[in-house]
Structure formats: C-alpha cells, structure tokens
C-alpha cells in the first residue's frame, strides 16, 4: 500500500490553486493521500463564530474541489481552526467532503465520532489513521460535549492507540500541535510523540507550526514534528516569514518497506506547488533534524527560544489577560498604549462587556494556560529564570 502525507492546507482563492505535473504524478501513484484541512467550510457572514483568541478562518466549497482534483482521500480535522464557526461549520465541512468522496478524521459531534480511527484496507494490508490536536479552542476534552476535535492528551488516548494497533498492520497518528514559526519541536512534544510510538504508533505526522521542523527515527519509527504548509495562501505574511510559510515536506510510505520512507521537499511559488530542488532547504531540514538528536544543544537552543518568545510575545499575552498595572502602562510608548487600548476595546466588544474595571480577559487567560505549547514554553522560561535567580546552577 502506498500512502502520501502532506501538511496544512487552507485555500482562500481556489482559482489560483495549482500543482505541478510531476507532483500530480506522485499523487496518482498513491493508494491514499492525506493532509490536514486547516479551516472549516463556512460563510463568515452567516455562520456563527466561536469566541476565541486568534483569527476565525474558513474556506469556501471550492477548496474541497481542489483537494479532490489533487487526489486527497482523507483529511485530518483535528486542528485549532476546524471549530472556528461552531457546529455549523463542522457539519458543512463533513457534508462537502462527502460529496467528493473524501473522508474526515479527528472531529465530530460525539466523543466516539471525534476519536474514532479511520480504517483503510487494500490487498490484505489494513492500516488506521488517528488525528489529534493540542488543546486549543474547539477541543473535545469532555465526553459530554456535543462537538469538537480529538485531544492528544486526553486520558484515553494511549489506550486508544494500543487497542487500534491490535486491529491493523500499521497505525499512523496525525498530530496538530507545537509553537508556530520555530524550527524545532518543544522537548515536551518530543517526549509525548515518542510515548505514542511506544504505545504502538508506526509513524507520527505533525503539523501546525507553519514551518518545517526536524524529524527523527525513534525505535525504527519515523516522527515528523511538522511537515509545514502544503498550501496556505493568506495575506499579510512578512518577507521574513514568507520563505518558511511556503515550503513543506511530502512523505511517501510504502507498507511493503515501511522504513524506506521518501521525504520530498516542496514549495509554493507563484501559487504553484512543486517539488523543491533547493539544496538550502534540504540543508535546513538536515540541520534541524540533527539538532534535536543532540540533547545538550537541543536543550540550550530551546531555552534560548523560550526566553526570546517570552520577551517578544508571551509576556504581553499575560499582560493582556491580566490587566497590566499603572507601572507597565507608564513604560509603554504612545504607539504601544494605543495598540493595547484597541486590543482591550475589541476584546470587550467580543465579550459584550464595556465596564472599565480591571476585569480578567478569560479567553486570553485560557489561551495561555490550556494550550500545551504556550504553557510549556512559558513554564520553561520561568523555571530557568527562577533557577538562575536562586543560583541553583
């Protein structure tokens, strides 16, 4: 059985979506092709947006047509945007996928449906796919919920993997997690992904960071921490981010030789997805993969990244959640004060509350605490800071 995995897909402008002929040939040769479908099918002016931190995004029905033309047969829906337009958006997505004979895995309208593996059998070989995401808005954490996507750290996940593996020859886990725009996975995710291999997974396919991260072979099983964006056209991407945003990996697995996985760099240029021949890209991937296997260098690098992100992003996130005191406001520039004030006004409009009291922004606080990647990287920085201040090292 031949299986292809691609990264994140969001198609806002279907008429501009195109794929090269040689990449089409790869898809034609596969028995099943899989990607992460990053946003629901919804009408932004009609369907109800959920309350969350970060953008609510959606796609039109034509994006499903693009998937079908390429040859995708299965999409992961376990991601941080699939519930952006609530149950209606999720229902629309399943309905439109069904029209093109494309299956979705990792989300649903009951706990059983969201966590149900997708099984595929061909020539006496049976495989299963489980899709999971970190605990963002829309996550299906409690069995009494009525919709959502499957959570990677639900207490039942390990048992689900063990049980599913007993039913199939190969089990593939598709995961949507990590910190965006950094080239390495958090060590906490490395530990968790390895644990899933220990439970019986044969390969881990990661996405969400919008950048290709390193990969490794653990106990003769591949772990791809992030394939990057297969196609995610959006406005407002800076030149600095654009290069990473538009390149990704495609992995080809033949179950007859499961350790002989083909790893193919691809990129988007002028809206055309094609195989990337650049040696620089291959060099970056090799370096990222080698670094995460060097424990000392990996730890130092992630500690540096944690400190950098605390100062550039997360410190302000917490100030936004817990209204900053007068001293903090006095240290801001006029431009920063205006920006902060606008953020507070928008937040109050969304919450339907206008009082000027120092009220906690519950959504922002949940965003910081619930999402494992945000919590872990902040904890890493604060722990290192505390150790340093107490002269424990």
Image: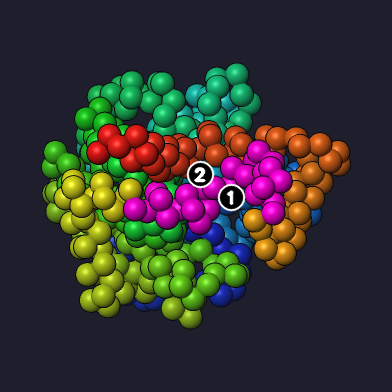
Residue 236 locus on image (x, y percent): 60, 70
**Image quarter of residue 156:** top left
Tag 2's secondary structure? Answer: loop
Label 1: few (<14), some (14–19) or many (≥20) C-alpha neighbours in 10 Å: some
For the point 58% across and 39% down, which residue is it? 367
For the point 53% across and 26% down, which residue is it? 141
Give whichever of 123, 231 is nearer the camera.
231
Instruction: Determine which residue is flagged by label 2.
Output: 79
Instruction: Determine which residue is flagged by label 1.
Output: 316
Tell me if 127 is positioned left or right of 355 in this view.
left
Residue 83 locus on image (x, y percent): 61, 41
For residue 181, above or below residue 268? above
**Colouring scheme applied when the structure was drawn:** rainbow
Q: Is residue 177 visible?
A: yes
Tell me if 350 is positioned left or right of 15 in this view.
right
Verify whether residue 153 appears in magenta.
no
Magenta region, residue range = 304-330
For residue 161, above or below residue 122? above
Verify whether residue 323 appears in magenta.
yes
The quarter of the rendered structure image containing the C terminus is top left
Assess whether mark 1 and mark 2 are in contact (beta carbons under 8 angstroms): no
Tag 1's secondary structure? Answer: helix
For residue 81, above or below residue 132? below
**Image quarter of residue 372:** top left
Q: CA distance from mark 2 to mark 1?
A: 25 Å
Residue 189 locus on image (x, y percent): 33, 40
For the point 69% across and 54% down, which residue is it? 330
The earlier-in-sequence mark between 2 and 1 is: 2
**Image quarter of residue 180:** bottom left
Residue 91 locus on image (x, y percent): 64, 40
User: Predominant secondary structure in magenta?
Assistant: helix
């Amino acid at each position: 059985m031949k299986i292809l995995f691609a990264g994140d897909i969001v198609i806002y402008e279907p008429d501009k979506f195109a794929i090269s002929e040689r990449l089409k040939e790869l898809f034609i040769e596969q028995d099943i092709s899989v990607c992460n479908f990053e946003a629901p099918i919804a009408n932004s002016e009609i369907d109800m947006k959920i309350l969350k931190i970060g953008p609510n995004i959606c796609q039109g029905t034509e994006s499903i047509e693009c998937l079908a033309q390429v040859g995708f047969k299965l999409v992961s829906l376990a991601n941080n945007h699939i519930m952006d337009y609530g149950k209606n958006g999720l229902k629309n997505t399943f309905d439109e996928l069904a029209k093109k004979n494309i299956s979705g895995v990792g989300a649903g309208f009951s706990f059983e449906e969201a966590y149900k593996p997708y099984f595929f059998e061909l020539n006496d070989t049976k495989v299963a796919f489980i899709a999971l995401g970190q605990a963002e808005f829309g996550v299906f954490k409690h069995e009494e919920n009525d919709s959502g996507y499957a959570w990677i750290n639900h207490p039942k996940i390990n048992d689900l993997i063990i049980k599913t593996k007993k039913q199939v020859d190969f089990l593939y886990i598709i995961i949507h997690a990590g910190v965006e725009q950094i080239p390495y996975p958090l060590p906490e995710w490395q530990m968790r992904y390895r644990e899933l291999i220990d439970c019986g997974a044969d390969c881990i396919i990661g996405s969400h960071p919008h950048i290709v991260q390193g990969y490794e072979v653990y106990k003769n099983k591949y772990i791809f921490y992030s394939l990057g964006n297969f196609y995610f056209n959006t406005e407002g991407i800076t030149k600095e981010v654009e290069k990473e945003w538009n390149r990704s990996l495609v992995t080809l697995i033949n179950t007859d030789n499961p350790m002989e996985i083909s790893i193919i760099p691809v990129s988007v240029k002028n809206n055309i997805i094609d195989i990337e021949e650049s040696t620089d890209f291959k060099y970056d991937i090799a370096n990222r993969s080698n670094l995460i296997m060097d424990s000392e260098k990996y730890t130092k690098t992630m500690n540096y990244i944690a400190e950098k992100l605390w100062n550039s992003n997360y410190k302000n996130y917490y100030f936004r959640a817990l209204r900053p005191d007068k001293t903090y406001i006095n240290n801001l520039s006029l431009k920063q004060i205006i920006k902060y004030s606008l953020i507070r006004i928008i937040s109050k409009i969304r919450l339907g509350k206008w009082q000027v009291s120092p009220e906690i922004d519950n959504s922002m606080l949940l965003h910081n605490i619930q999402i494992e990647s945000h919590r872990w990287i902040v904890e890493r920085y604060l722990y290192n800071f505390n150790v340093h201040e107490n002269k424990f090292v």
